[in-house]
Image: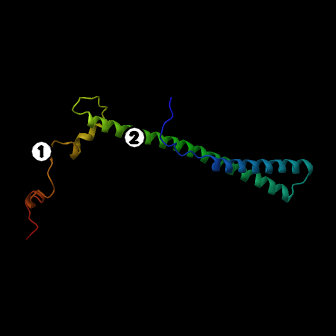
Amino acid sequence: MAESSRPQPYQPGAVSLFFVAKAGVFAAAFWIWLLIMVLRTDPATGLQVLAATGAITTTLVAVLLGARMALQQNAAIRHAEVKKLLVDISWNAFTAAGNAEAGGKVVPFPTGAGDADWPAQRSGTDRVSARDHGASERNGGRDRRR
């Protein structure tokens, strides 16, 4: 298939991946430091508490950044699909308008069941401007200009 001339959608990439990898490296370093300190000493020291705190915190940061990057990537893909769908719909409408006399195949835009109640969907005889109503019709026979 030929490559599309459309620009590629935004994909979170190098910067987000850098921060996820950086947090992962720091988390691994803290976990290794904690493991070494636990294996070398018997009583719990302040450095072990610091290593444990750092390991837990950086692990949580890495997980949160990774989840955020995945959500951004999914949102970018969905956004690109919606944009493509909107372009396809508008192109369909444009070609349908151009082929109206030729009887071309028109793909109708899906509408809900209650859309016929909207004023834009009514016949032209039902449309009346708000300025065309007299004061007696608007206020039930009462005139405000007394």
| Residue kind at label 2, given as amino acid type | Val
Q: Nearer the viewer, residue 57 or 62?
A: 62
> Which residue is the site of mark 2?
87
Q: Residue furthest bottom?
A: 146
Name the secondary structure under disc 1.
Answer: helix
| Residue kind at label 1, given as amino acid type | Thr
- Are the two marked residues, 1 and 2, in contact with CB atoms closer than 8 angstroms? no
Give the image location of residue 24, x and y in percent: 73, 47
Q: What numbered label is drawn on residue 38?
A: none
Name the secondary structure under disc 2.
Answer: helix
Q: Residues within 10 Å of mark 2 (few under 14, many from 20)?
A: few
Residue 111 is at least partly visible in this image: no
Which quadrant, please, contains the C terminus?
Answer: bottom left
Q: Nearer the viewer, residue 2 or 38?
A: 2
Q: Earlier in the sequence, mark 1 or mark 2?
A: 2
Q: Residues within 10 Å of mark 1 (few under 14, many from 20)?
A: few
Residue shown at 15% from the left, 48% from the top:
127
Give the image location of residue 58, x and y in percent: 72, 52
Give the image location of residue 94, x and y in percent: 31, 39
Residue shown at 35% from the left, 38% from the top:
91
Residue shown at 76% from the left, 51% from the top:
26
Depth check, mark 1 against mark 2: the one in front is 2
4 up-or-down from 47: above or below: above
> Which residue is the site of mark 1?
125
